Amino acid sequence: NKIKPDYVIHLAACVGGLFKNMNKNLEIFEINLLINFNVIKCCHLYKIKKCISCLSTCIFPDNVTYPIKENMLHNGKPHESNYGYSYAKRLLEIHSRLYRETHNSKFICIIPCNIYGENDNFSLEEGHVIPALIHQCYLSKKFNKPFVVKGTGSPLRQFIYVEDLANIILLILEKYEGNDDLIVATPEKDEISIKNIAELIAHYFEYDNIKFDTNYSDGQYKKTVDNTKLRNFIDYKMTDIKTGLSNTINWFKLNY
């Protein structure tokens, strides 16, 4: 009411990595339900011209054919490790769609793959995989201990650099007039294993004492998504993983 915005980019969420999701499914579900309901409801009440809400590729069904497309979001149960977060985000998609159908509102959702970059949450317990691994490797080298990676390292992921995601969101805000949800992800060919990510991080820290603790869950093995719809709309060159990791690690060292 005070700001009277024309547009809303809804990124707010109670969110974390695999182990936060597993340990706090109820808390994450309730907090995100409240956040999402209030944001979408207020966007309607204050006649927002366009609202872009952020989902996640981790909310897609666990048992699904690959690559995953936007219209497959509700085709089955999400992975059990994060079903609280997943169902809250799926309801956000339904809420937005109902406003489009009922009031012709420009409320759309984007579905990004795993995000990383500067200013992330580098918590060892609750951060996403890349920031948590960067922090872990930093401490391992500092105290000359093994760089322990939770799980086997075999799961595959697509990672998008945060600056790329920000730029693409602005392009969608300015130019996209469709009503369909959009997957925002790096190409399928850039999918990479957690093991390779850990090795790249160790390389940048010049530390090669890596161990994989297989007592921990791997979570979902893969969730490969198809970014064809996005590529049909914009031509954007993504930051490669090596450059993005280098930028992120340099920022982390300077701001630890």
Image (cartoon, rainbow, N blue to C red):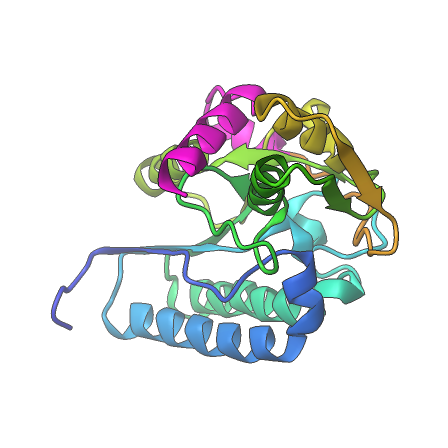
Q: Is residue 158 left or right of residue 168?
A: right
Tell which of 111 and 107 is nearer to you.
Answer: 111
Whether residue 168 is situated above or below residue 205 in the rendered picture: below
Q: How many marks?
A: 0
Kindly tell me whether residue 66 is visible in this rendering: no
Residue 37 seen in this snapshot = yes
Q: Quarter holding the C terminus?
A: top left
Q: Residue at x 69, y 39 (%)?
A: 225
Q: Is residue 37 above or below residue 182?
A: below
The reply, left or right, for residue 4 in relation to residue 129 is: left
Query: Picture quarter containing residue 165?
Result: top left
Q: Which residue extends farthest front?
A: 143
Q: Quadrant of the N terminus?
A: bottom left
Question: Is residue 251 magenta-colored?
Answer: yes
Residue 189: horizontal and vertical position, in percent?
71, 22
Residue 244: horizontal and vertical position, in percent?
Answer: 50, 26
Provide residue 172's location: percent of width, then percent of height.
Answer: 39, 39
- The residue lying toward the viewer, choosing from 192 and 38, is 192
Q: Which residue is more in the foreground, 253 or 18? A: 253
Magenta segment: 227-256
- Work out whether 196 lies above or below 138: above
* 152 on left or right of 190: right
Q: Residue at x 37, y 61 (%)?
A: 105
